[in-house]
Image: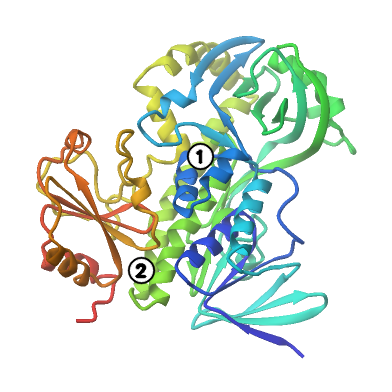
Amino acid sequence: MVKVLTTQVLIIGAGPTGLMAANQLSRFGIDFIIADTKSGPTKESRAIAVTARSLEIYQQMGIVQEAISGGKPITFFNLYSNGKLKGEVKIGEIGKGLSEFSYMLTFEQSKNEELLAYQLVRQGKVIYWNYEFIELKEHKEKIRAVLSHDHEFTEVNAAYLIACDGANSAVRQQLNFSFKGGTYSHKFFVADTVMKWNLAYNRLIIAPGDQNFCAFLPLYSDGGYRVIGTLPKKYFNKEDISFQDIKRIVINTLGLDVEFESVHWFSTYKLHHRGVDHFSDGRVFLAGDSSHIHSPAGGQGMNTGLQDAYNLCWKLALVLQGHAKPTLLNTYNEERLPFAKWLLQFTDRGFNIMTSDKWFVKIFRKYIALNFAKPVLKNPWIRPIIFKVISQIWYSYHSRSLSKSVSGQRLRFKAGDRLPFFSEGNIYPNFTKASFHLLHVDFTPLSVELRAKIIMSFPFPINLVEADLNHSWKKLGVTRELFILVRPDNYIGFISDSLDEIKTRKHLEKHFIYRI
């Protein structure tokens, strides 16, 4: 007999993306079932870097301190060639004033999964471990999916499905999504090690060599470092290769005195760069690696999956709660697909420059890129740009259908941007509720009566936040009263000098449901 379960959202895959989706739905009170073929959170470290934008999400969820205490801040980025330092950036400085988390944190995928899973468990939620997705019987009008556990079948009925089941997504394959791209010609290795050297254990080091490429990322444990790189061609077809086989090559590529005391995990693999041309089909949505995979350049993979889930789930929640029209869900593809396409190009180009063995790329890398790295990385204009790109705080949904400004002020931010951050008077702690926020910036707060009227004028619950029109806002071009509608994911949806109910309604009624 087939067991039947009913829920609002079915999530296939309990990696970082799926667990983030479950946590975001939980914040909104949406019922879900999350299932994975694994027996529990990933044991291997796998993806390793958590960027500022992801830490801001964890802050909104109330778990950022757990992530920080369990991770290792990378405070320096070094570029080495033949044992010589070609460039250095103090990461904690280049992000100063741009985010509270002005650094990159090594917080392994396994720890992210443990933290996000624990957050669900302590809320009384269940994760269906050892459940395999078998097939979708229906996905246009509703979701009917079959899962298998201990040779018994379970049918899950849901309104929507989020496929977070990775690069080999069974959901994506069944629905025949395109997944165009290719495979890098190189073979790669990854090793989690304990090592000794004369450098501090707080820096990301990239060392492109003439014949191969290596990168070193600090792990939480003392002396712990993740080492990744290109596998020498003579080992491509060798079976049972170990880190011991390539240890000397790694040391020679870096060009520094290094002693590897132990290796906790070692693996070789091929890297792919592929992406879908649409993030949804019927009531099925793809997120994370199921929709885009790319090189590890810049530590973007896991963070992008977290952002996908973050963008999608508040929209699903408002539709399921009756506050929004189903058309709102189209904006997930509208907003996230362009970023996925850009990311594939960005990581592909960067990775090819570091790893290519073509003669002209070698010349560019050795005599141009590396020699100019030091002055470029010291440039005070370029350093913040590097941080914005790597941390993903630069990306904007400007010009998308959810973003509109009717302000006449010459603002230095736009609708669609991430909420502005100020070092002095950080406003982010005021935006933790699972709802829209209306930010009112002025010298004088709104009256109680006006606040009540404004709150009632919106088609969804909002939380009203007051901010004094201080020096920080003036630097951003705010000279008089301003209203900023902040989405649940802390991106700006609407900007107006006065809360004109007609203009506001004209913008929002495209995707949201007014009851009056």
Circle 2 sits on which residue? 328
Look at the numbered disc 1 and give the secondary structure of its residue. loop
Occupied quadrant, residue 443 = top left
Q: What is the crowding at mark 2: few (fewer than 14 residues within 10 Å), some, or many (at least 20)?
A: some
The amino acid type found where label 2 is placed reads Leu
Q: CA distance from mark 2 to mark 1?
A: 28 Å
Where is residue 229? Give x, y as percent: 70, 29
Q: In this view, which residue lies farthest toward the front?
A: 448
Please report the residue visible at 56 percent of the width from the left and 35 percent of the height from the top. 105
Please report the residue visible at 66 percent of the width from the left and 46 percent of the height from the top. 111
Please report the residue visible at 11 percent of the width from the left and 52 percent of the height from the top. 497
Where is residue 224? Give x, y as percent: 72, 29
| 413 sits to left or right of 361 | left
115 in relation to 509, above or below: above
The answer to whether residue 190 is visible is yes
The amino acid type found where label 1 is placed reads Thr
Look at the numbered disc 2 and give the secondary structure of its residue. helix
Q: Nearer the viewer, mark 2 or mark 1?
A: 1
Camera-side residue: 92 or 371? 92
Q: What is the crowding at mark 1: few (fewer than 14 residues within 10 Å), some, or many (at least 20)?
A: many
Q: Quadrant of the N terminus?
A: bottom right
Circle 1 sits on which residue? 51
